[in-house]
Image (cartoon, rainbow, N blue to C red):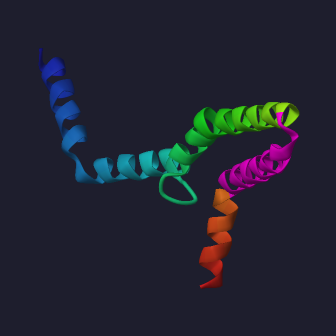
Amino acid sequence: MEQLRRLSSLGRRTVTDPRLVAKLALVAALVFLPLLAQAYPGEQMVNWARGSIVAPLCFLAIVVSIAVALVRPQVAVVAVWVTIISLFLMFVLSNGATITGQLQSTN
């Protein structure tokens, strides 16, 4: 019984020891901080939106504009502009971290 009481008091002491808590917090921060590091706020949301929403919509817009250009050749210019704008949008979303870093380093 005495040994159980000693183990119990040892457990309470280690949990409330501020030095141990500080060490555990430091280790947790060093382990999990790289997982949370982002180049800019909202980077994960932008990456998700790029892959789940923007890319399929750009692809669909390109296909529809090409199909319309085949039916009505006078709107072929619209198909070209839709393709250019879609590619530019995907480029900006894909390289957002690099663009943000370059803009911050110039100031």
Q: Using the image as rendered, state which of residue 92 and residue 75 is in the foreground.
A: 75
Q: Is residue 23 left or right of residue 41?
A: left
Figure label count? 0
Residue 55: image location, x then y, percent:
68, 38
Residue 99 visible from this viewpoint: yes
Q: Which residue occupies 36% across, 49% down? A: 25
Residue 90 within the magenta-colored segment of the rendering? yes
Residue 35: image location, x then y, percent:
54, 45
Q: Is residue 39 above or below residue 48?
A: below
Asked which quadrant contains residue 71, the reply is top right
Residue 87 within the magenta-colored segment of the rendering? yes
Residue 9: image location, x then y, percent:
15, 31
Q: Using the image as rendered, state which of residue 5 and residue 62 is in the foreground.
A: 62
Q: Is residue 62 left or right of residue 40?
A: right
Q: Split into 4 quadrants, where in the image is the C terminus?
A: bottom right
Asked which quadrant contains residue 60, the reply is top right
Residue 35 visible from this viewpoint: no
Q: Is residue 27 left or right of residue 100?
A: left
Q: Looking at this view, name the residue that lies furthest to the bottom.
A: 107
Q: Split into 4 quadrants, where in the image is the N terminus?
A: top left
The span shown in magenta is 72-95
Q: Looking at this view, name the residue that lies furthest to the top.
A: 1
Q: Which residue occupies 44% across, 50% down? A: 29
Main SS of residues in magenta: helix
Q: Using the image as rendered, state which of residue 65 and residue 87 is in the foreground.
A: 65
Residue 49: image location, x then y, percent:
56, 40
Q: Which residue occupies 53% across, 60% down? A: 40
Q: Which residue occupies 79% across, 47% down? A: 83
